Structures are given as structure tokens and as C-alpha cells.
Image (tube, grey):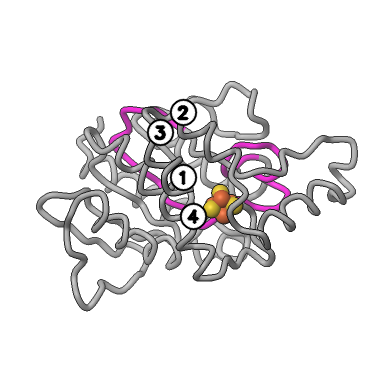
């Protein structure tokens, strides 16, 4: 799997290869079981039921790093943050920031396009309870590393959605950029910011999960502030 990731010559190649990954037995079983049993509201749909590739442009200056696809969101539609409430919140914010051409993301063929931005997850398969194991995170890391390597020429800032994504960035920093992560690691928080000299800046943002957005822990204004800061750091108008 590491070799397949490393061989990917561009994002199209990488997206195709990751979609055909079966490296984690527990996650393969879960993604396929969810696709088989489905949620009642989506009973008439055919679920994607496979790893979910990144989404966005190849010359992204802003990367958005999430945790993993949702069982009935990306695992259903085949596109990250698509078809669930987390995606509703995220893409509405990206649209307000001028980074998405529309505020909604409901299906892989809905016409959504990003500007200067690429979204990807630390783990590419939907995990039970949204909790990948450390071993699954590490097994999936080569896909993230290769994706970051492919957009490295333009990438200037990474927005980590949640503490899991924040923690998943440091190994990628070391492997892709040859930069030793700071020790101790900077603590995740909403608005946390780390900058190195030879690598993209890292911005922390509470995850766009329902748990955070329904409770008001993460508001649209807070997201707007993070993306305004990301655009500034990335030199995006
Ligand atoms: S989580 Fe990643 S490494 Fe594991 S099966 Fe899915 S795509 Fe492959």
C-alpha cells in the first residue's frame, strides 16, 4: 500500500489508487456493512462504500485536513464532507470565504468546485463511532503523505479540523518536508497556529461535527475567522 501511494504521479492517479485500498480489515468490513445496510433515509441509494479520496484543486494553497469520512456522508456519496451536516457547515463557510462556488455539497456530481483549496482526511475510510485506531491511522498515513507531496509546490497552510487531524499532521510534516516536528508538540485549540520556515503553516479549527456546531462550540463566525486567516497566510485574495 505504501508503494502504491508512493507511485501515484498525480492526484487523479492517487485518487484512483486510494479508492481501491483494502489495507485495514476492520474498516473495510465496516464501510461495506454500512453500505449494505444503509440508513432508512437513503435506502434507495447505492452507497460508495469505499475509501474516500481528497477533493479540490491540484494547485491548492490551502489544505483542509479532516479526521475520516462519515458513514452516511462521504461513505455514501464518495466525496469527502458531502451529504451530511458537517459538510453543510464546512462548505457554507468555504462559499462565504470565496473558496467554493456553491454553499452546498450533496452529491459527487452536484457541480461543487473549490478554488485554491483541497480537502482530505487523515483516515480515508469511515470508522465505527468516528474513531480510527492508532494502527489504522498509521496504516493510512502514506495516502495523506503522498497527497501533501503532490500539492507541496503550492500548499501554504493546512487547517486541521480537530485534535486528531492536528496530531496527524506532524508525521506528514516530517516525511514530506523533512522538518522535525516541534517538541513538545503545540497543543491543539481553535485558532492555534504553528509556523515553520520550510513548511506550510498549521491552523487549528474545531471540527465541523454536529456535536460542535449544534452546541455552539463552533459557530459560523468562528469558521469565517479561521478561513480568513488561512487565506491571509496562503496569500489568497
Ligand atoms: S483507512 Fe486508509 S489504509 Fe485503511 S483501508 Fe481505508 S484507505 Fe486503506
Q: 171 left or right of 96?
A: left
Dot 1 corresponds to which residue?
A: 120
* Placement of the C terminus among the 4 image quadrants: top left
132 left or right, relative to 154:
right
**Circle 2 is placed at which residue position?**
13
Residues under numbered marks 1 and 2 in contact, where contact means CB atoms less than 8 Å apart: no
Spatial CA span between label 1 and label 3: 16 Å
Residue 157 seen in the figure: yes
Q: Which of marks 4 and 1 is nearer the N terminus?
A: 1
Question: According to the image, label 3 marks what residue?
Answer: 8
Mark in front: 1 vs 2:
2
Per the image, label 3 sits on a secondary structure element best described as loop
Q: Distance between the residues labelled 1 and 2?
A: 15 Å
Residues at marks 2 and 3 touching, judged by CB atoms closer than 8 Å? yes
- In the rendered image, which quarter is residue 98 located in? top left
Q: Residue 177: x, y in percent?
A: 20, 50
Residue 80, position in %: x, y? Answer: 57, 42
How far apart are the alpha carbons under marks 4 and 2? 17 Å
- For marks 2 and 3 on the same chain, the one whose residue lies earlier in the sequence: 3
Judge whether 24 appears above or below 158 on screen.
Answer: below
Question: What crowding class fits label 4: few (fewer than 14 Cα within 10 Å), some (14-19), or many (20 or more)?
Answer: many
Residue highlighted by disc 4: 140
Q: Assess whether residue 182 is covered by the magenta stretch.
A: no
**Which residues lie in the magenta part?**
56-82
Coordinates of residue 162 in the picture (x, y in percent): 45, 63
Amino acid at each position: 500500500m505504501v508503494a502504491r501511494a508512493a507511485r501515484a504521479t498525480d492526484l487523479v492517479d492517487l485518487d484512483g489508487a486510494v479508492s481501491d485500498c483494502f489495507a485495514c480489515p476492520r474498516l473495510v468490513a465496516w464501510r461495506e456493512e454500512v453500505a449494505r445496510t444503509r440508513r432508512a433515509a437513503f435506502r434507495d441509494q447505492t452507497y460508495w462504500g469505499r475509501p474516500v479520496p481528497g477533493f479540490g484543486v491540484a494547485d491548492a494553497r490551502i489544505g483542509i485536513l479532516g479526521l475520516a469520512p462519515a458513514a452516511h456522508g462521504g461513505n455514501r456519496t464518495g466525496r469527502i464532507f458531502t451529504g451530511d451536516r458537517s459538510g453543510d457547515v464546512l462548505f457554507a463557510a468555504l462559499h462565504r470565504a470565496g473558496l467554493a462556488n456553491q454553499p452546498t455539497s450533496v452529491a459527487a456530481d452536484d457541480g461543487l468546485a473549490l478554488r485554491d483549496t483541497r480537502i482530505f482526511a487523515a483516515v480515508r475510510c469511515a470508522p465505527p463511532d468516528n474513531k480510527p485506531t492508532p494502527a489504522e491511522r498509521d496504516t493510512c498515513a502514506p495516502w495523506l503523505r503522498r497527497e501533501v507531496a503532490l500539492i507541496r509546490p503550492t500548499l501554504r497552510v493546512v487547517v486541521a479540523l480537530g485534535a486528531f487531524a492536528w496530531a496527524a499532521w506532524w508525521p506528514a510534516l516530517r516525511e514530506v518536508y523533512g522538518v522535525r516536528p516541534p517538541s513538545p508538540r503545540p497543543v491543539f485549540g481553535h485558532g492555534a497556529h504553528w509556523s515553520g520556515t520550510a513548511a506550510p503553516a498549521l491552523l487549528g479549527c474545531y471540527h465541523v461535527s454536529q456535536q460542535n456546531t449544534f452546541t455552539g462550540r463552533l459557530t459560523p463566525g468562528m469558521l469565517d475567522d479561521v478561513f480568513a486567516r488561512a487565506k491571509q497566510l496562503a496569500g489568497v485574495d
